[in-house]
Amino acid sequence: MKKTIVAALALSLTATACTPGSGSSSGPASAPSSVRTDAAALGQVELTVWDQEVRGGQAAQMTAQIKAFEAKYPNIKIKRVSRSFDDLKTTLRLALSGNDAPDVVQANNGRSDMGEFVKAGQLVPLDKWASAYKWGERYPDSVLQYSRYSADGKTFGEGNLYGLPQVGEVVGIYYNKTKVAKPPASWAEFEAELDKAKQAGDVPLQFGNLDKWPAIHVFGTVLDNYALPDQITKLAFGRPGATWTTPEKQQAAEVLVSWADNGYFPKGFNGQGYDPAWQEFGKGKGTFLIAGTWLQADLQKALGDKVGFMLPPGTKSVTGGTGLPFGITNKSKNPDAAAAYINFITSPDAMKTLTSTGNLPIADIAAQQAPAGLAGDIFKGFGTAVDSGLLVPYLDYATPTMYDTIGAALQDLLAKKATPQQFLDKLEADYSKFAGK
């Protein structure tokens, strides 16, 4: 399956995205003229690493990786700072502009984060290390391009390499097997199941949108039912000629509103956090949950063999890509040690650790033995999405400000403060401003 997945990824994944900087650009960071890969010969080193691997399976794999790394290289100590995705996104941009920036950071590869960090010269190009460690043999170009930017940060998907991810991601539908006898085979059957759950007095679709970004995944999943991969890819990567004002996007917005009107979401969903929502699903409250594969380990622990995962049935596209990549900051005093750490946590052995802790590895998929049950569902779903050429990037990649724009606009849409047309007009205004440049 590995060769097929790599080939399909090359056809289906292309990138562009962008925005967090504070202050003016200081220009691109310089790549080192030479690199050292003998980590044991680097002397006594302490590396400060910031990541967002805070949930069960994510935290478990990172703890195991660091322990193994320090055992292999006792001269290098890891000072780890772990934060939630939202906290990391908020604090990282400030930290990178300070004098005490971490050595290694896990940065969202969208334009609003990595693109701006590259533009400000805060991340170091990794190409020399990529060549020395032969990362190109482990990772296909279709994966690496999600962490590539031009030196000025303007073009996403081409140029220098600024990060390396550990995991693959796909957004799909978790379902409670005690409530769904047979997974729906079509979009119409899925909506019928939502209505059936409502009539039975259950929460049809568990959902919390206080953080704003969760609705991006739900709306993206609905849009996947109506728009072809090429349409979404061009839009999400900020390509010329793309637009938000199409019949497919209008229909997707109307469907999302109808779900709220029909009571398919829990009461007060716009005021409930993302974590409390999926945790409620883990307690058996709710029939379905639209979320990414990063919740695999936690939901497996909470529900055991009662939880399943499926790609949205019958859709034309599937949202997904890579997890947040790890990069090296321009303030790192030990970039060779930082590169050795990134190489270690993305190695073939690391992929085995990721699998054993309930995560979805981005490389060596065919070499992994996925456990039965939920993990098997997720491995199969990710492989199918990539193999079929259905995988499309996240919508908030589209412009440097789209993450904030679409998150706020979706809250307004679901709160009936904006019509579907007003919602799309707001996104188009953001996109046009960016594309016009």
Image (cartoon, helix red, strand yellow):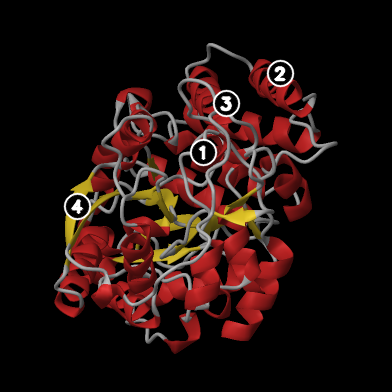
Residue 240: x %, y % from top left: 82, 37
Q: Which mark is residue 401?
A: 3
Q: Which is more foreground, mark 2 or mark 1?
A: 1
Please identify the quarter of the rendering in which residue 209 is found: top left
Q: Earlier in the sequence, mark 4 or mark 1?
A: 4
**Circles 2 and 4: CB atoms closer than 8 Å:** no
Residue that label 2 marks: 429
* Furthest residue in direction right, as rendered: 241
Distance (Cα) linking label 4 and label 3: 29 Å
Residue 64: x %, y % from top left: 19, 70
Figure quadrant of the C terminus: top right
**Label 4 CA crowd tier, 10 Å (few <14, some 14–19, many 20+):** some
| SS at circle 2 | helix
Q: Which mark is residue 80?
A: 4
Q: Which is more foreground, mark 4 or mark 3?
A: 4
Residue that label 1 marks: 121
Please identify the quarter of the rendering in which residue 206 is found: top left
Three-letter code, disc 3: Thr
Q: Is residue 3 left or right of residue 428?
A: left
Q: Nearer the viewer, residue 338 or 66?
A: 338
| SS at circle 1 | loop
Distance (Cα) linking label 3 and label 2: 11 Å
